[in-house]
Image: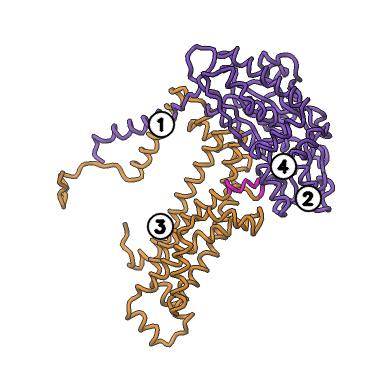
Amino acid sequence: MSVPLFRTAEKRTFTFPGWLRYILIGAIFLIAWQLYVSLSGVSQLLIASPLATLQALIADFANGQLPSAILVSLQNLAIGMGIGIVTGLILASLSTFSRFGRDLLTVLTAVFSPLPGIAILPLTMLWFGLSSSAIIFVVVFGSVWPISANTDTGFRTIGTTTRMVALNLGLTRLQTVRDIFLPAALPHILSGLRLAWAFGWRTVVGAEIVFGVAGSNGGLGWYINNARYFLNPPAIFAGLVVISLLGVLLDTLFQFIEQQTIVKWGMKQAQ
Amino acid sequence: MSKRQWPLAISLIILVLFLSACGNNANAGSSSNAPTSFTIVYQPGLGAATFIILKNQKTLEKQFPDTKIQWDIVNSGSAVREAVISNQGQLGTLGVPPFLVGWDRGMDWRVLLATSRSDSWLIAINPRFKTLKDFGPNDKIGVVAPDAQQAIVLRKAAQQQLGNAHALDRNLVAIGSADGEQALLSGQIAAQLSGSPFQQREIAAGGHVVLHTKDVFGPVGAGLTVLSQSFYNQYPSFSKTVYQDLVNESTYVANHHTEAAQALAADKASGGGGSVAQFKSLLDDTSLVFEKTPSGLVAYATFMKSIGLISKVPGSANDLELPTVSGTGN
């Protein structure tokens, strides 16, 4: 099927706007899901219907369980990512300015980045005990490598002209990084961040499930695990829905940041 | 995607969903007297003695040569429940509360018989933990699962001593008994509430008892061996034979501590690890009672409903019992 390069006004057929198409797909999926649960006779203990999930969502939002679980998970993610970003930027800066720094980053990234964050959880549980520090450390570990590697690439691909300007102005190294390198490498840094948070988010939820710590230290992973313990599939589904929705929201946030910075500044084409 | 592909894609999704729900049917035998396969799911600890002996003596295998008898060890009653829901296991052994949670949510399982009852201890290493009042928000207490018998007893104790059944919810950590023992000794958790032989080893390693579970609900709440009502109805004679075998083994274990201790020591995964002499002294300890009559069903259900963990209470224990123990429990 060939697609004409330019469509004339007469040929253009009516299409729904993007958001409506997405909602339509979502609605079809939800209806199919509900029909499946209602009609197939599948045990309600194995799969919850969208309506039961919605009820669980409303109930657990009202009684405060979900909001507090969301806060805990986001807090773990934010602290872990924050430390990961700072560490990643420092590593990338060292790598830019010294041969040793570059070797260090190369070796560290090669050795540690293939390790899934969850894999080091048993170790961090030994080091930090059953506290949120263990989870935060795992998030730092999961996010620091994509951030440092991407930032490093960003720093390295900065044009010679830009570098020369920094030299000409006689800036210190710190000033060079802060005022020249960081803005110039922003497209790479942001894609590193998007990668890192995606790692981090999965890691936080996974770690909370493995962890099994209840109550105040329990985030969304704990919430779905607890629902499992009390044989409450609608709550498990509700937890999954929240985890997914928060993921979409966080991704939208990063798109917004890109829109407001590198797209606006003409460093990246809008999609 | 072209318009023509849409119906195809959607029907594919629905097909996948339908297929994924067609789980396996381990015991989808014909109308014969015994299922083609039968999986027993139990938990590690002293109470597993009955099952280890039954397994070692191959009693069921001899009685039902055409049935594939399998054994699975899992770490918590919740895991037993999942095995039964997904039909990975038919006979399960678990505490009263996880059984009640399953019953409350609509599982059709009932009690075939009780297994054993023992006093579990809340054990701490640090001497500053003398009562439940000494636990701060960061002092973790290990239990095998938040719905385990120990966790429910702890909530009742919290209600009695602290005035709020949920006061210690934030302290609970779900951890298997063997891992919990390590976590307690290495200081990762402040206290552990599991059972024998773990608690005695923790005492030997310098721990002290903060709470006896027998002081909270009284001498009730023996572990349960459960089977689904539909399985029992389909294979009544098979089920009754399994019941009788378990009664026999339970009596045997109660009267032959040395043999039971040898079986426990030889099977580390089931017994939890230890020497014959250690298991012998644990079995001789009168706090462990092998009993066949379920107890505490209504008492636990009433408490669990009162704190919102389940939604209903059985009219009587009879509602939860198979004909094998019908009308005997409480």
The magenta span reads: A208-216
First-in-chain label (2 vs 1): 1
In this rendered view, identify the residue nearer to me: B35 or B248. B248
Q: Is residue A269 magenta?
A: no
Q: Identify which residue, A195 or A2, lies in the foreground.
A: A195
**In which quadrant is the N terminus of chain A drawn?**
top left
Colour chain B is painted in: purple
Q: Nearer the viewer, mark 4 or mark 1?
A: 4
For label 4, the residue is B274
* Structural crowding at the residue carrying mark 4, measured as other residues with C-alpha within 10 Å and reported as few (<14), some (14–19) or many (≥20): some
- Asked if one can make out residue B212 in the rendered structure from this viewpoint, the answer is yes
Q: Chain of mark 2?
A: B
Under circle 4, the secondary element is loop
In front of the other: A109 or B280 = B280
Instruction: Report helix, strand or loop for mark 3.
Output: helix
Q: Which chain is orange?
A: A
